[in-house]
Structure formats: C-alpha cells, structure tokens
Image: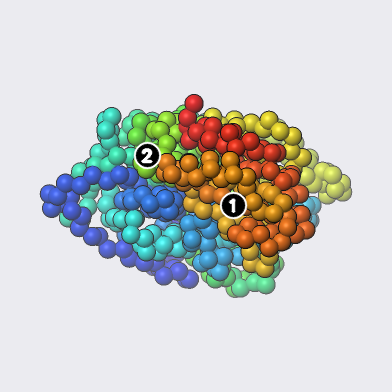
Amino acid sequence: MRPAGRADTDSLYFDYPRFPFVRPAELDGQSARHRVAIVGAGPVGVTAALELARHGIASVVLDDKATVNDGSRAICISRHSLETLQQLGVEAPFVAKGLGWTRGRTYFRDREILRFEMPHSEQERFLPMINLQQQYIERFLIDKAAESGLVELRWQSAVTGVSQDADGVILEVTTPEGDYRLECGYLLAADGARSIVRKAFGLALHGEAYEGRYVIADIRLRSDFPTERRAFFHSRALPDTTLLVHKQPDDIWRIDYQLGPDEDPEQAVAEASIREKVGLIVREVLGEGDVWELEWWSLYKAHTLALDDYRHGRVLFVGDSAHLVPIFGVRGLNNGFADAANAGWKLAWVLKGLAPERLLDSYSPERRGATLDVFANAGKSTRFMTPPSRGYQLMRDAALALALHNDYASGFANPRQVTPYTYGESPLTLADTDDFDSGPMPGAPLFNHRLGEGDYLLDHLGSGFTLLHFSQAGRVDAELADRLAALQSRGQQIGLLRVAREPGAEGALGDRDGSLFGAYGAEPGSAYLVRPDRHVAARWKRLDPADLEPALVAALGGE
C-alpha cells in the first residue's frame, strides 16, 4: 500500500519499469514446445532461468504483471546467495547498490542486551549479509535475463490452468490479446504463496501458522546510523510489541512492528495508524526526530508451511510456491535462491542427457530437508519474537530481563541468521571414509578462500562439476588424468582445479603459506568432488582414481 494520492508504482526512490506485452507465436497458431517453462518472474523464478541458461538450457518465463513487485519485501541477501549470484555473473550491481552488514543489536526496555557479530574474515569475498530492496533485486536479475539469448520473458501473461501427462506439461495462458496453450517438457513453479500451479494440482502446504502479525513499513529517513539489524522488545514507544529496523539504500528504512493481540489488522494498516505508529518509533525509539516520509507498507503473518513433496511429475516447485517460512533470520528469499540453483542444475543435466531423470528425485529431499531445518530455527526465532501464548511470553520476557544484568543470558535473543544447508543425508552425497580434521564435509557448500588481491577460490569454479585436487607441485598422476579425460570424452562436464604448495606450477592455484591446504584438511593427493551448485559430493584424503567415477555417478542420481 502507498499513501493516498500515490499510485502503486509512485515511489520516492525507485523508477518502476514497464514491461510491454510481446505477442507470442502461439497466439498466431504456431506450434511450439519449450524445454522448460517457469511461472513467476520474481527473484526465484528468474534466478532459476539464469541457472538453466548458465548450463545452456533455454526457458520461457511467464508473469501476469507488467513491472516488478512493489515495496521492499525481501531485503536481506546472504553471502551464500551472493556466491550463487556470482556464478550467474550478476553479483556486481547487487554489491554496488546493497548495504553490507556484519552485526546486530537487540534492546529490551530500550537498553542494549546483545550485540552480535556474524562470522566474517578476509578469506571471504562478500560480507555475511547485504540489504537491498526487492525491486532492485528483481530488476538486476531481469536485466541479466534480458541480455541472455536463452531466457524469454513473457509479461502480462497470466497462467490460469495447468495439466500434465507422461510427456510434458500444458499451460493455459491469458494475455491482453487473447488466450493460448503453452506446451513444455518441464515446469518450474515459482509463482509464490498463492501459487496457481499448486492449486491446479490440488496440492496443499502443511505446517503451522503463527498468531502474531507484523506491519512492514518503508520510510525515507536521512540518518547516519550504520547498517545493522536492530530488534527492540518492550520499547517505551510500543511497550507490548516487538519491532525490527533495517537500513536500506537510498535513505530507505524498513520498520517491522508487531500488532497487539487485540488490534484490528484492517484498522492497523490504515494510513493514519501507520503514520502514528511509525512516527512514534522514529522519534521515541530511533531518536531521529520527525523528518521522515512514508513510502510503502504491508501486513505480514509468520508461517512454517511446506508441500509434502516439491516434485510433482514434471513440475518442480521452487520458492514460496513450495514453502512459506518466517522472515526472522532472513530465510525466505535466500532459501528460494538455493531452490533455484538446486533445481536448475539438475534439470539442465537431465535435459542435456548427462544424468538420468531420477536425478530430479533428489530435489525434494534436499530442498525440503533444508526447509525443515529452516523451520526448526526460524520457528524458535518466531516464538521468541512473537510468543504464541502467555506462558511463552512470560519465559521470553524473563530471559530478556535476565540479559539486562547477565551476559550469558543474552544468547537467548540471538536471531539465528540463515546459514546454507548441508545435504549430508542426500542420496547424491557420499559419506566420509577418511578422517578430515577440517574442510567442508560431504553435502556442505564449498567455502571461499582468499588467494590474492581480488582473487578467491570460488572465482575459479566452472559451470559443471569440479574436482578440487591438492598436490605438492600442481600435477596429477597419469591414471587420474586418463580417467578425467575419459569422463570428459563421454560428455561429462567435470573440470580439474589444481591447488599446489609449490609456487609457479602452471595452471594451478598457488598455496604458498599452506592456508588453503589447512582450511580444507588436505595433504598432497587429497581431493574434493564439487557439484555445480558448489556443494561437496565426496572427498578423499588421498584419492584413488578408481573412486572418482562411482562418486560422480552417485552424484548424478545413479546407483
């Protein structure tokens, strides 16, 4: 919602694009079958399209809108998501525009009880988190997709029906110039919480809906306060509620505040009520005076809901169409980015004939497993931020009061920020048979390491599988080289990334001080097999070349 007299796209800081309707061939009776269709041109849907394009697979993306979503919505992008965006070649505008942060503060009765620092070191290219409004997120992704010859964006194209059989999926599409049917081999449903695709198949989300409701308001406020996540419990301005504050680019501040149990949600989102509450927060809690402008607001309710299975035949559900998670810990969009990367590379490998179709069966257990992990952590945060009963509130407030005078108790208020999920139980992951004292375990994402000025380990990954190989002088033995060449000759996309202890090894990454060896628990002959989404499929303290192909087969859904 926006203030009276302003249109939905009349923003104080963002110029909303207008995407024209382009008449598709199907409306002129031309038959076309697409390899992949994606419903929803939000950040998750377009990321999935870019991931497919990274692997050479074309897709068509349909959305009923003519512009990007309004309001800030999802604003926090994690380091792991930025690494995904780097793989897509689109990270630069995100980093340039976004506001990075590493710390947060929590207050109880206007006294600071916790100051937390997210893990960060010089080994990382990106900060743990950046704040960036969703309008920019969508625009940067859409601009990248428009540059690609493999992503066709169809705006003002509403999907009204979906059906499938053993050979493909059929979409019923309504446009300003008429209706048509679109045929595709596979469908990615990225059409959000009210997914038309999900409803078309009679599928339901299961889980919990929490009682607490929050108003989300964007304001323009000029302030020198640093970019941090701030949470306030029982402030003097709103003594019975919880509120969160985030700084965004363009002097835009995001304020989330909880409604009281007896407040009427309809009245709470009336403009006069928003102005009164926000003015009180800015003045009494943030201490910023009365000079601010109202940009946009909405109402939010926390859920932990998910489909029982994220794959339905030839349809894969990604993002909010598959799951709804609480905002606490900034898990929603970041979880969706991981869905898109996971579904994208697997579908690409199937379509290119590099993996059997059963590889797609691993999508649901991996990503639903990640969702359940999010539920476990975000559920704790939600119950802390919004106690579901008087008993919970008494315990929460007792913990906060204890933290006023006891540092050990402040951990109760830790927001448990999002962390990437480890696919340790995935059928694609081979458990360790060797003893490692460090390094990413099988199923975990590869972590970064600084190699030099502006040069990091993850910069050197290709688009396919990677064998990260450690040696003294940067050489691999003849048997391993032959096995890699044989896999590549059969079309498998697997590259070799060599790490050498000795300087000057041609084509190898130098590790002169041994810090990369140490971080990965490696010795000469150690190796990590890394999937296209940067997760470790297997690792060996000393790789026997005969073990490489079975590990790759397993990582591609083989038996």
> In front: 448, or 481?
481
* Residue at the (63%, 36%) spot, across then down: 544
* Residue bearing the label numbered 2: 353
Seen in the picture, residue 450 relative to 233 is either above or below; the reply is: below
Distance between the alpha carbons at the discs numbered 1 and 2: 24 Å
Three-letter amino acid code of the residue under disc 2: Gly
Labels 1 and 2: the sequence-earlier one: 2
Farthest residue to the front: give it. 478
Secondary structure type for disc 2: loop
* Residue at the (48%, 41%) spot, across then down: 486
Farthest residue to the top: give it. 559
Farthest residue to the right: give it. 405
* Relative image position of residue 304 (x, y in whole percent): 54, 36
Secondary structure type for disc 1: strand
Residue 15 picture quarter: bottom left
> In front: 261, or 113?
113
Seen in the picture, residue 178 relative to 383 is either above or below; the reply is: below
* Relative image position of residue 558 (x, y in whole percent): 47, 30
Q: Quadrant of the N terminus?
A: bottom left
Q: How many marks?
A: 2
Crowd class of label 2 (few under 14; some 14 to 19; many from 20; radius 10 Å): few
* Relative image position of residue 536 (x, y in whole percent): 60, 41
Crowd class of label 1 (few under 14; some 14 to 19; many from 20; radius 10 Å): many
Three-letter amino acid code of the residue under disc 1: Leu
* Residue bearing the label numbered 1: 497
Left or right, 214 with reference to 12: right
> In front: 334, or 467?
467
- Determine if residue 402 is in view: yes
* Relative image position of residue 384 (x, y in whole percent): 68, 41
Left or right, 515 with reference to 170: right
